[in-house]
Amino acid sequence: MIIGRMNAGDFGVRADGKTIDGEALQAALDYSSSPKELPVAERASLPDADTSNVWGRLSVFESVDLVKDRFERLHRRTLGSDKAREVASHVAQARSYFESAASSDVSVKPLLQYYGTLAISRALILYRVPNMRESALAGAHGLAEMQWGQTLASGLPNVADLRIKVCHGTYLQLAHALNCAWKASILTAPIPSQITLSKSGGLLPVGSEFTLGTLAARVPDLAGEFESITGLASYCFPVFVFQLSPDTYTDIDFFPGLHGLPSLEEMTQQFKIESALDDRTYHFRVGAVRHYYVRIRHKSLHEVAEKLPSLSVDRQGQTYAIRPFASGGTQSVILTVFAIGYILGMFSRYFPTAWGNLSSRSSGDRVYPLLAAASNLVQTWYPIAMLREFEEWR
């Protein structure tokens, strides 16, 4: 559901000649003397389908000299040729893995994709952490399988229940390098202005556990497949977010997925929302649709990030609110997709028979379309996400 356009007068100012909402009036005045329909999240983005363009831009980081130039611009310090060569080597290796995955048989594609994911992630860690050298990069993945044989013995439909645990390794090093729980662009006054909000942190502790299903349910670009294939509600909800100013309020409208919305009480608890949610049946752009609305008041951008739910944007530009993990923690979608890539790679590597049965349209392959969509996301989206981090999209 793309909820992307807005017109003047939709800020709560009533055209009855009597009622005036001061905050709403100011927002309307900020809009324009000649209102137009404008996109909510008019953000710079790369064409997701054009992976050759992505790797063309990432090739900048395969040059030792250009890595040194970009590093100095980012960190305000010089970079030695040896470390620059380490960054460039990891990017070049990642490109080779992803290129091989694109033309490989489905039996090995997820493994090659994961090794590409691992290589480009290690390159970013080296680039973003000034004193980190290749010798200090973790040898372990940072994720570990938990009783996969037992899970798969119960049948292929249980693949979504494959469980992993956070350990020390690349996963946590990447989390430290990103230092971002969530990031999204939202509309703000005067329209069509927009700002990118982000919250630092997003480091789930060692020992945290999650399944393939609970990870996929938290990726906006997989939410549709997850809901239609599993018959369960995802943990992502399309939202319309408008901020009047950092020291006033932010309005959020939560819209239903394929399986509707949870109760007001469940939504409040799941998303840790302090203000009261309002159950509404009409939205000025979408029309007659049940949704939840909340106005969150704050006094600074820092307070905004603390009070808002975890947000992310899918490839079509739609903003989503993402439910926290059971522990209450949140993490960047980059880390979530990294973990999904790890599961797919290790599954195809160590359980090739089960993987082959799924990918060859055997009985019990219900979950395979979700795995295929996840594999495609790793192949096409992850390099784009990495490029944005290399190019300092913060």
Image: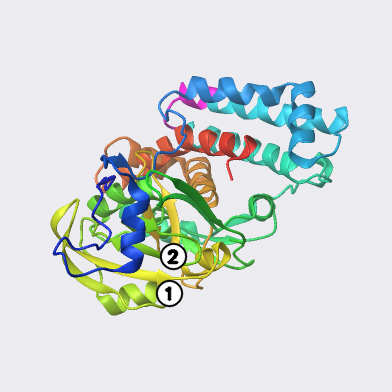
Q: Nearer the viewer, residue 342 or 84?
A: 84
Alpha-carbon span between mark 2 and mark 1: 7 Å
Which amino acid type corresponds to the residue marked 1 in the rendered image? Lys
Q: Nearer the viewer, residue 34 or 81?
A: 34
In the rendered structure, does residue 103 fall within the stretch colored magenta?
A: yes
Which amino acid type corresponds to the residue marked 2 in the rendered image? Pro
Mark 2 neighbour density, 10 Å: few (under 14) some (14–19) many (20 or more):
many
In the rendered structure, does residue 367 fall within the stretch colored magenta?
A: no
Q: Are marks 2 and 1 in contact (CB under 8 Å)?
A: yes
Q: Nearer the viewer, residue 160 or 386?
A: 386
Mark 1 neighbour density, 10 Å: few (under 14) some (14–19) many (20 or more):
some
- 177 vs 48: above or below: below
**Scheme of colours in the image:** rainbow
Q: Which segment is the magenta one?
A: 99-107
Residue at image mark 2 = 309
Say if residue 229 shows up in the picture. yes
Residue at image mark 1 = 272
Q: Secondary structure at mark 1?
A: loop
**Quarter assignment of residue 200:** bottom right
Residue 370 position within the rendered picture, expressed as x and y whole percent measured from the top left: 33, 45
Name of the residue lying farthest toward the left: 288
